[in-house]
Image (cartoon, rainbow, N blue to C red):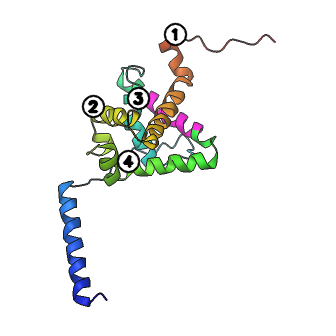
Amino acid sequence: MLSRRRFIQAGIGGGAILLVIRAAYGPFSADPEIAEDREFAYAVLGPKEQTILRAVAPVILAGALPDEPVERQRALLQVIRGVDTAVSGLPPAVQDELAQLFALLGFPVTRRLLAGVKPPWLQASSVQIASFLDSWRASRFALLRGAYRALQELTMAAWYGNEASWSRIGYPGPPALAG
């Protein structure tokens, strides 16, 4: 039977171990969230998910986005809106899985442990984000590879499905139907 003394010792020992682990992984700072987009009614993505996409999408779409800063920010906003539209059309089970993925990436501890990204998303360098994406793309775990594919495919579909991207790739648009 566990005595009160053993119970207290175990509690103190466990607390000390947690403090050492916490100190080893350094201070955790919450992600600053992006300003709320009041011009679009988001069906699925909240501010945390939008923040993650704002950091990850430019790395996934490297070279595809406009170079001019104002146009680049406008394009990123269109990508985030496009991802929201795409996810809102998916079955509820898939939406739940994506919500779990964004929750893992949005929590500082799991962001650091699973993605290897120490700073908050908006403060992470493109090299850190690219390293995270590459590690998930080539992971031995099917779950991480699937999560990478989900992020990549949603981002690509949101950008290349947007008419604003077509001129950059020389796509004239869908053919007109004879009426």
> Mark 1 or 2 closer to N-term?
2
- In 3D space, how far apart are the residues under numbered discs 2 and 4 (Cα atoms)? 21 Å
On the image, the x and y values in percent for residue 122 come to 32, 41
From the image, tell me which residue sits under label 2: 127
Q: Earlier in the sequence, mark 3 or mark 2?
A: 3
Span shown in magenta: 75-86
Q: Quadrant of the C terminus?
A: top right
Pointer 4 residue: 33
Residue 89 placement (x, y as % from top left): 64, 40
Q: Secondary structure at mark 2?
A: helix
Q: Residues within 10 Å of mark 2 (few under 14, many from 20)?
A: few
Q: Nearer the viewer, mark 1 or mark 4?
A: 1
Residue 176 percent across, percent down from the top left: 71, 12
Q: Residues within 10 Å of mark 1 (few under 14, many from 20)?
A: few
Q: Please name the residue shown 46% across and 27% down the image.
A: 75
**Residue designated by label 3:** 60
Amino acid type for the residue under numbered disc 2? Val
Q: Secondary structure at mark 4?
A: loop
Residue that extends furthest to the front in the rendered view of this protein:
1
Q: Quick check: is 79 in the magenta stretch? A: yes
Q: Who is closer to the viewer here, 71 or 116? A: 116
At a point 37% along the width and 29% down the height, the residue shown is 59
User: Which label belongs to residue 170?
Assistant: 1
Q: CA distance from mark 1 to mark 4?
A: 35 Å
Using the image as rendered, state which of residue 83 and residue 118 is in the foreground: 118
Query: Furthest residue to the right?
Result: 179
Verify CB contact (< 8 Å) between mark 3 and mark 1: no
Q: Three-letter amino acid code at disc 3?
A: Ile
Q: Secondary structure at mark 3?
A: helix
Q: Amino acid at mark 1?
A: Gly
Whichever of labels 2 and 4 marks the residue nearer the N terminus, that label is: 4
